[in-house]
């Protein structure tokens, strides 16, 4: 993977030339996510995968519609020249950081309705697996609530 100088400057990233920076970062990401999972955090990672053709269409919309101009930057077009480099980088990142405990879900994103639906399905499945519940009040708090209820009900004449 080639990292361009302007990207390094813009992202304040170290120059990885001759160093194993990315391997170390992938390992650190996996270790951090493993730590989170081991401590009860459910990690859900979603990547919206947009095609080059659809990206061009969206850039044209940003240019052609004044209310969307704020979303456009000339650097967007310069970066498109590195499309294949970015795809290789994404592929490597996904393959290095998708783990059994924190897998990636890559969603086709050319149609927003579909990517939103597919992402919602992943989140619903994750929430179902977590089975979240409101915490139960401890007995002392329940006793306080019983007294508070009686006081409030009396105030309302109930």
Image (cartoon, rainbow, N blue to C red):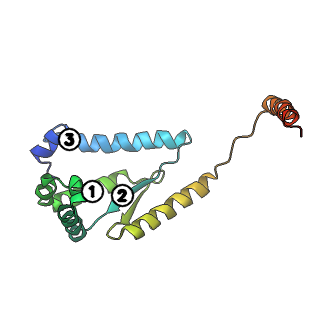
Position of 34 relative to 119 (above/below): above
* Residue 88 in sight here: no
Q: Is residue 25 left or right of residue 139?
A: left
Mark 3 residue crowding within 10 angstroms, few (<14) / some (14–19) / many (20+): few
Mark 2 residue crowding within 10 angstroms, few (<14) / some (14–19) / many (20+): some
Residue 81: quadrant of the picture:
bottom left
Residue drawn 86% across and 37% down?
153
Residue 76: quadrant of the picture:
bottom left
Q: At numbered mark 1, what does the secondary structure look like: helix, strand or loop? A: helix
**Residue identified by numbered label 1:** 90
**Residue identified by numbered label 2:** 47
Residue drawn 77% across and 33% down?
138
Of marks 1 and 3, the one in the foreground = 3
**Residue identified by numbered label 3:** 11
Position of 18 relative to 93 (above/below): above
Whichever of callouts 1 and 3 sits on the residue coming sooner in the sequence is 3
* Residue 151 in sight here: yes
**Residue 85: x percent and y percent?**
17, 58
């Amino acid at each position: 993977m080639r990292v361009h100088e302007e990207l390094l400057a813009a992202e304040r990233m170290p120059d990885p030339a001759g160093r194993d920076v990315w391997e170390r970062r992938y390992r650190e990401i996996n270790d951090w996510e493993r730590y989170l999972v081991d401590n009860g955090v459910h990690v859900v990672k979603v990547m919206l995968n947009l095609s080059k053709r659809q990206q061009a269409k969206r850039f044209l919309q940003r240019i052609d519609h004044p209310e969307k101009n704020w979303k456009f930057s000339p650097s967007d077009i310069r970066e498109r020249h590195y499309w294949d480099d970015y795809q290789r980088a994404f592929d490597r990142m996904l393959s290095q950081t998708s783990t059994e405990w924190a897998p990636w879900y890559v969603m086709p994103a050319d149609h927003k309705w579909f990517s939103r639906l597919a992402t919602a399905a992943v989140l619903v499945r994750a929430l179902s697996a977590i089975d979240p519940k409101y915490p139960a009040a401890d007995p002392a708090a329940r006793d306080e609530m019983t007294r508070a209820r009686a006081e409030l009900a009396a105030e309302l004449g109930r």
